[in-house]
Image (cartoon, rainbow, N blue to C red):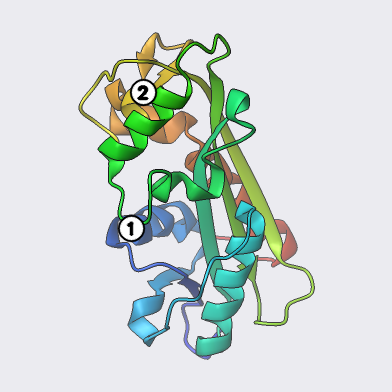
Amino acid sequence: MTGSNTPVLVLASGNAGKIREFQAMFAPLGIRIAGQKEFGVKSCDEPFGTFVENCLAKARNASRQTGLPALADDSGLCVNALGGAPGVFSARFAGEDADDEKNNLLLVEKLQGIEDRRGHYSCVLVAVRSADDPEPLIAEGFWEGEITDEPRGKGGFGYDPYFLLPEFGRTAAELTADEKNAVSHRGKALARMAELLTHRWGLKA
């Protein structure tokens, strides 16, 4: 993927924690995950209504500006009774400048009096060899749960304190980091993408 000994896959993100997480997952494939800021990549718009379309736009943008293969992710909470909302707007459900508290308060408010509290976290990963790659790799991961009225737990972020996992009897915010990574939507999507990179792109340890 580059002229160096270690192939580079550009991650369309500047989040240091995410870069470390992705690097740990893909290290056995012998590649280096590099955040797009390392190459001065300018972020692109995410105007679409689906995770996969926004992911593809971000991956192609990063690849176009670097000339390297690129990977992008998008994730959010989808609630059945709300027609899949907040979906791609999860981070800004209560407005462009909303924080986790405001987003959670709006979610609970919209579910008042509704019996069906089922929802799931969704994560989509898209990888492209080049900006015009006609065969992007697409991996998805889902994490089923229910929305509670009261927050529980101090861990996690976003909607985690309100995301109850029936099989654990705890919210996502009450799980340890290792427990969460083993069952989360992102963990599942990362594992699937590692398989695709191995079988479709021929990467292996």
Residue under the point 38% across and 72% down: 35
N-term mark: 1 or 2: 1
Compared to residue 119, the image places residue 59 above or below, namely below
Which disc is residue 162 wearing? 2
Q: Residues within 10 Å of mark 1 (few under 14, many from 20)?
A: few
Q: Secondary structure at mark 1?
A: helix
**Residue 203 in view, yes or no:** no
Q: Identify residue for label 1.
A: 20
Residue type beneath disc 1: Arg
100 to the left or right of 123: left
Total number of numbered discs in the rendering: 2
**Residue 52 in view, yes or no:** yes
Residue under the point 61% across and 76% down: 60
Residue under the point 40% across and 73% down: 34
Q: CA distance from mark 1 to mark 2?
A: 26 Å
Compared to residue 49, the image places residue 107 above or below, namely above
Question: Do the numbered discs 1 and 2 sit on residues whose CB atoms are within 8 Å?
Answer: no
Residue 196 x %, y %: 68, 55
Residue type beneath disc 2: Tyr
Q: Secondary structure at mark 2?
A: helix
What is the quadrant of residue 100 in the picture? top left
Residue under the point 41% across and 67% down: 13
